[in-house]
Amino acid sequence: MTHARLEKLYDAMAAANLDAVAINPGPTFAYLTGVSFHLMERPVVMFFRPGKDPAFILPELETPKLELMPYKTQAFPYGEIPGEWINAFKKGIQALGLEGKAIGLEPRALRILEYRFIEAAAPGATFPDAASALASLRITKDADEIAKMRQAVVIAQDALKACIPQIKIGMREKELASELTMQLLKHGSSPEIPFFPIVSSGPNSANPHAAPSDRKFQAGDMLVVDWGAAYDGYISDLTRTFAIGEVAPEYQKIHQIVQASNAAGRAAGKPGAPCAAVDKAARDVIEAAGYGAYFTHRTGHGIGMEGHEDPYMRGDNQQLLEPGMCYTVEPGIYLTSRNGVRVEDNMVVTESGSESLSDMERDFRVVGV
């Protein structure tokens, strides 16, 4: 599989006129090698150039991981003296003949640490943005990848279901977030969960990216829970909104609107449809109900090895959906200083339409009493 991914990489590089790419440890590195490698204070980078074995710059202490590589690499390890690290970069770049070449970089992934060494070791080289070329590798998922994402959804849903009976008036947001994290691990999530759960109640729920606080749940609150699990390198990202006890009629109303918006967004995904169509379908429902000004973010984003990746479900994105693309549909209404609602599901484009990987109840639900 990794050999096929290498060929896919080289095809994408040729289309983008790249002589080579430099990859930090991270999702793209794991996708191309199948090896997990964490970033540290020591530089780590792999260079890929068609026709040559990849060059791997790494600390000597990490060389046992070379045995895990699925294909032959040229290793250029270095010791603990920082002043000598540049020599490993020079040797690796010379081995691939990259002086004066176009070396593609991932702007969101490659650190300044590695970039400075590459720049110094490759005189005359240029460093074009390779984000689009590299994103194209992972934007469609195969059956094995989708199966892992499906399991990440099952783990996440089961973890939250285990928490719901514990929700009570007076419970703190941080308490529920901590319990949910523990349940994610108990139900099989990898230790590196995609993100710490968002648990926001009452006025905090009107902030889409609120961090769990010491605020206690009160009757009349809406409770937004945005959480996900990780399974074998792939993630889930879900949101459900609950009512704490009896809430004002408007909050039940906006929940129903968001639920309908979510359904419309889920139904809009199909091969050949632009990403913008998913955003429009969800947004139209909220705007028709008179709450358009309170839906303040895009409808969704791609998911896979990262929580946010291509494709993005926003109004200006004319990228066409293809079978195997995976993304979220997460419309919301946020009434500042009052309450908010969001409902989020994980989708995969099929040959004839799209499928929701998540099926946890979306209906208005009272908890905590």
Image (cartoon, grey):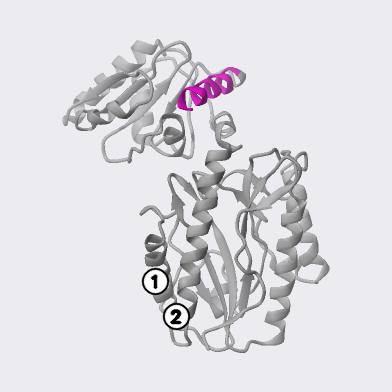
Kindly give the residue lying farthest to the right in the view shown: 288
Place residue 247 in its image quadrant: bottom right
Closer to us: 135 or 19: 135
State the residue at coordinates (45%, 16%): 49
Amino acid type shown at disc 2: Gln
Query: Can you identify the residue that label 2 sits on?
Result: 166
Q: Which residues are magenta?
A: 1-14
Q: Is residue 198 visible?
A: no
Badge 1: residue crowd in 10 Å (few <14, some 14–19, many ≥20): some
Coordinates of residue 40 in the picture (x, y in percent): 28, 41
Q: Are marks 1 and 2 in contact (CB under 8 Å)?
A: yes
SS label for mark 2: helix
Badge 2: residue crowd in 10 Å (few <14, some 14–19, many ≥20): few
Closer to us: 203 or 253: 253
Inter-mark Cα distance, 1 to 2: 9 Å
| Residue 12 forms part of the magenta stretch | yes
SS label for mark 1: helix
Coordinates of residue 290 in the picture (x, y in percent): 80, 71
Query: Can you identify the residue that label 1 sits on?
Result: 179
Place residue 180 in its image quadrant: bottom left
Mark on residue 124? none
Q: Is residue 263 left or right of residue 56?
A: right
| Residue 303 forms part of the magenta stretch | no
Report the predominant secondary structure element of the magenta stretch.
helix
Relative vertical location of residue 232 with respect to residue 95 in this rendering, above or below:
below
Amino acid type shown at disc 1: Glu
